[in-house]
């Protein structure tokens, strides 16, 4: 913009950038789900997913390059965290997806956001909160706060902070096991924040916000999908049922985590029935993109491995 004076040009050059993401790969599923692999200006790769529902278009965004949480079933943690994304890099994922929708000549817009992509949002707390405020602001992307959900693997200290933010954004907790022994086995973070620390943070959130929380539970065959675990989950949520929803998630297999398999349909149904019969609000998540690299982080991991082989 050479019509600006030189001092202003210098300020812009030192403090602003116009665009950071370039599209590397775009995978399209038969069900309409689209997974984007974006390259950042420093060469790092991230994933963003567009999903179509009856209520509109939802985008799952990434908050970190890699992940240090190290859940044993997750493709995102195959590569440790390289760095945090800044708020602008997270916002631009939404804008890139919106440009894709605009190019289809459809009068559609991104209406919902889930912060469940690569990385732990609460490990990048300040940038994640800036992102949420920008996309929610009427002068930003004007996406309703109640149409946005942030998922955490259980950073208890940040759950207290999030409860105090006084915003209407939804919270989801990646629980995946109803007892410490099993949760620690599949989620290393449980060593730092066992259920004795985590559940009081959830209680504080519920009391402070009076907002329903979603408990995400990936079903792993013969690991956490027995009726016994379902009964333990009922007990764990005993005093929270009125503000709880359990999202049962069929597992998307990852080559590098071949110790896990998808639960049988009967096991999923039995687990669901135990919760339902004991007054726990629950459902089995509708799957998206199963014919592409559905697991979070899977496309990125494959591409990085391919790039290394070609060097």
Image (tube, rainbow, N blue to C red):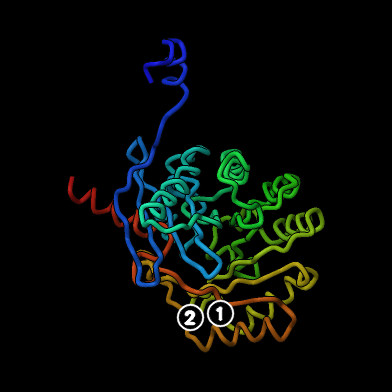
Residue found at the very far left of the displayed protein = 310
Q: Pinpoint residue 220: horizontal percent, then vertical percent.
A: 50, 75
Q: Quadrant of the C terminus?
A: top left
Residue drawn at x 40%, y 49% as measured from the top left: 99
Relative image position of residue 66 (x, y in whole percent): 43, 48
Q: Which residue is drawn at the image coordinates 41% and 32% (left, top)?
A: 18
Percent position of residue 79, x then y:
39, 51
Residue 309 vs residue 95: left or right? left
Residue 305's disc is none
Q: Which is nearer the eye, 83 or 104?
A: 104
Q: Is residue 18 left or right of residue 276?
A: left
How busy is the neighbourhood of tag 2: few (under 14 within 10 Å), some, or many (20 plus)? many
Q: Is residue 292 above or below residue 77?
A: below
Of residues 247 and 187, the one drawn nearer to the viewer in this rendering: 247
Residue 64 visible here: yes
Q: Secondary structure at mark 1?
A: loop
For the residues labelled 1 and 2, say whether their Cβ atoms are less than 8 Å apart.
yes
């Amino acid at each position: 913009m050479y019509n600006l004076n030189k001092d202003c040009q210098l300020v812009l050059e030192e403090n602003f950038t116009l665009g950071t993401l370039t599209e590397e790969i775009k995978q399209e599923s038969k069900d309409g789900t689209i997974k984007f692999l974006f390259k950042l200006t420093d060469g790092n790769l991230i994933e963003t997913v567009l999903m179509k529902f009856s209520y509109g278009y939802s985008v799952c965004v990434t908050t970190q390059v890699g992940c240090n949480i190290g859940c044993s079933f997750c493709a995102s943690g195959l590569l440790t965290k390289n760095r945090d994304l800044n708020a602008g890099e997270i916002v631009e994922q939404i804008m890139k997806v919106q440009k894709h929708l605009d190019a289809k000549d459809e009068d559609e817009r991104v209406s919902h956001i889930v912060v469940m992509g690569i990385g732990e949002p609460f490990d990048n707390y300040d940038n994640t909160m800036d992102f949420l405020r920008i996309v929610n602001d009427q002068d930003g992307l004007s996406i309703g706060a109640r149409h946005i959900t942030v998922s955490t693997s259980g950073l208890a200290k940040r759950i207290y902070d999030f409860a105090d933010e006084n915003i209407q954004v939804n919270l989801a907790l990646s629980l995946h096991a109803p007892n410490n022994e099993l949760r620690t086995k599949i989620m290393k973070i449980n060593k730092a924040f066992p259920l004795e620390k985590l559940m009081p943070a959830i209680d504080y959130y519920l009391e402070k916000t009076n907002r329903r929380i979603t408990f995400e539970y990936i079903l792993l065959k013969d690991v956490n999908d027995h009726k016994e675990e379902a009964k333990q989950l009922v007990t764990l949520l005993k005093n929270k049922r009125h503000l709880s929803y359990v999202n049962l998630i069929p597992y998307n297999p990852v080559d590098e985590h071949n110790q896990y398999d998808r639960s049988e349909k009967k096991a999923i149904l039995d687990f669901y029935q135990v919760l339902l019969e004991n007054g726990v609000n629950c459902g089995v998540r509708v799957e998206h993109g199963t014919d592409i690299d559905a697991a979070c982080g899977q496309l990125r991991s494959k591409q990085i491995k391919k790039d290394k082989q070609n060097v």
